[in-house]
Amino acid sequence: MNEFFIEYLGLFITISGFIIGLGAVTVIDLHGFFGRTSSYWTEATIRTHKVTKPLIWIGTFLSMLGGYIFFSQVSFLPIQKIYFYIFSILILNGFFLTFYVSPFLINQEKNKKAKKLLPTSLQNKIIISFLVSFTGWWSSLAIFLYIVLNK
C-alpha cells in the first residue's frame, strides 16, 4: 500500500477515536461532576453513561489502532511508548468504571433509586477516576499532536 495512504489512514482513525472518546468522556465527566450534589444530575448520569460507556471504549480502541498504524509510518520517537502507556492506564480506569461503577449505577436505576446521591466513598473513587480520565485523554492527545508535528 502507498505509505501516504497508510499514514493518512492512521491519522484519520486516531483523530476519529479522539473525537468519539474524548467527546464521550467530557459529557460523562461533566454529568458526574454535577451529579455529586444533585439528584437530577445523578439520574441523568446514570442514563447517559449507557451511551457514553461504549463510545469511550470505541474511542479508546480507535485511538490506539490509529496510533499504531500512524506510528508504523513515522520515525520512532521514545514518546510513542508514553502514548500507549497512557492508554494502558485509561483501559484499567475503563475496567474500573465498566465493571465496578456501571453495575452499581444500573442497580440504582433498577431499584428505582436513580435520583439518590451516590455514597461518598464511591463519589471519591469516581473523582479519582475522573482525574485519571481527564489527564490521560488530554495528555495522550497532546502527545499525539507532538508526534504528528515532529515526525
Image (cartoon, rainbow, N blue to C red):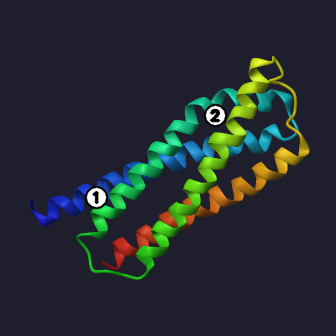
* Three-letter code for the amino acid on which mark 2 is drawn: His
Secondary structure at numbered mark 2: helix
Residue type, numbered disc 1: Gly
Residue farthest along the left direction in this orientation = 1
User: Which residue corresponds to the image point at 81% horizontal and 17% vertical from the top-left?
Assistant: 112
Q: Residue at x 9, y 62 (%)?
A: 2
Q: Tell me: 129 left or right of 59.
A: right
Q: Are marks 1 and 2 in contact (CB under 8 Å)?
A: no
Task: Decide if residue 53 is in sight here.
Answer: yes
Q: Would you name the residue on which mark 2 appears?
A: 49
Disc on res. 10: 1
Query: Mark 2 packing: few (<14 Cα in 10 Å), some, or many (20+)?
Result: many
Q: Is residue 100 above or below residue 84?
A: above
Regarding residue 45, the answer to whether it shows in the image is: no
Image spot of residue 54 (x, y percent) = 51, 37
Specify the quadrant of the image occupied by residue 39.
top right
Which quarter shows the C terminus?
A: bottom left
Quick check: 9 left or right of 57? left
Circle 1 — which element? helix
